[in-house]
Image (tube, grey):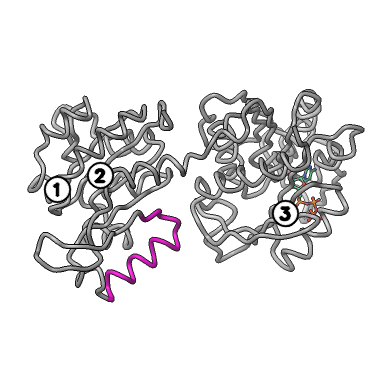
Amino acid sequence: MTLMAKRILIGVTGGIAAYKTPELVRRLRDQGAEVRVVLTAGGAQFVAPLALQAVAGHPVYTHRFEPAGSGMEHIELARWADAVVIAPASADFLAKLAHGLADDLLSTLCLASATPLWVAPAMNQQMWRATAVQANVATLRARGVGFVGPASGAQACGEVGVGRMSEPGEIVSAVADSFGVPVLAGRRVLITAGPTREAIDPVRYISNRSSGKMGYALAAAAVRGGAQVSLVSGPAALDAPANVKFTRVNTARQMYDAVLAQVGECDIFVAAAAVADYRPAQIATKKIKKNAETLSLSLVRNPDILRVVAARAAPPFCVGFAAETDAVEAHALRKLQDKKLDMIIANAVGEGLHTGFESDQNAVVVVWAEGRREFATMPKTTLAQALMTMIAEHYAAKNPA
Ligand code: CTP
């Protein structure tokens, strides 16, 4: 069963194809998935909540604020899901998604969710071809939303063309494939994430804008790939991913110690942390007072964790990150060679960019000795899946069984 223990949230919007959704739910459960269903007011015109409840084995969610609920259903469901699948997705709902509207439970939870989102559009062929719909589709695709269909054929309205919802079997296959095969089964993966904090005095520190999201998403993707994962994280406002050995540190030197203590037992090391390159030479024992007009801090170099790991006698497969404001690929290539890495993942960071630091999205170029591959802007969760698959393939090529 390819979807064993995967948590799939199905959204049903208004369209005649909603009659196929109970079949979709049944097939997902046949594959081992746990399913919850959110029905919009439009969807409820085409399929009865009880029919969906019977196949899902769980009550259907219909309102943003259930009378007996916590009022936080949209957040709870968004966190619960491993994937969200909207089937059928009406033209109206695609427009809501594209523009970030949040006027019912389903649209609100889509905004609140960082998990991969799939849509199976269903509408009249003329509607599907409409410029407005196609513009929304292009926006959603660019954001990394997965599309299944629509298929072509006879339509409920009597017309023939593209706009039919894909068959449930096809939707199940697309979602199952996205979770990937366990390419990292038996592998031990060590990942660093987040910023570090270098104390100046008891209340102040030097740090950077890293959120840790990319490293945490990579850890979750490695778990999904079947690896044994250890995550060493600087201060980040994120929950530790499930099924991960989690070590929380503050400073670069603590991160260095935590990594060195574990690196001997790892096959793959991914350095996603934004480690502070320097720390104050001295930490004031008392809060520094503003007595002087100017204040100079003397800084000393921190150990370069990735460089030290890659220089070991028998290093793991080493993957670095390069967050750059300029000449992104040139700097990345230099770091790849200089630190003797197997692979480096480069991304542009800086003011005005909607990717990289603090963002849910990222666009990267991956560089290795013999090649390069670009990934357009997409959610960090989706990107992490693709990157982890790529890392696993390169690791396997370097270490044939
Ligand atoms: N890195 C590390 N330990 C450090 C500094 C960096 O492990 N003390 C790792 C990062 O996790 C990242 C890679 O090295 O994977 C590149 O980090 P970056 O700060 O971009 O590069 P630096 O080598 O520090 O070079 P510079 O700051 O000059 O750009």
- Between circles 3 and 2, the one closer to the viewer is 2
Residue marked by disc 1: 43
Where is residue 136? Give x, y as percent.
32, 67
Distance from Cα at disc 3 to Cα at disc 2: 38 Å
- Identify residue for label 2: 11
- Residue at screen point 81% across, 25% down: 264
Residue with the mark numbered 3? 322
Q: What's the CA distance linking mark 3 and mark 1?
A: 46 Å
Would you say residue 143 sits in the magenta stretch?
yes
Residue 268 higher or lower than 342, as above or below: above
Q: Does the residue labelled 3 lie within 8 Å of ligand 1?
A: yes
Query: What type of secondary structure mainly makes up the magenta span?
Result: helix
Which stretch appears magenta?
131-147
Q: What residue type is labelled 2?
A: Gly
Location of the C terminus (image quadrant): top right
Q: Which residue lies furthest to the right in this view?
A: 313
Circles 2 and 1 in contact, beta carbons < 8 Å: yes
Q: Which residue is drawn at 64% across and 47% down?
A: 390
Q: Which of marks 2 and 1 is nearer the N terminus?
A: 2
Work out how far the residue at label 2 is from the one at label 1, CA to CA, in angstroms: 9 Å
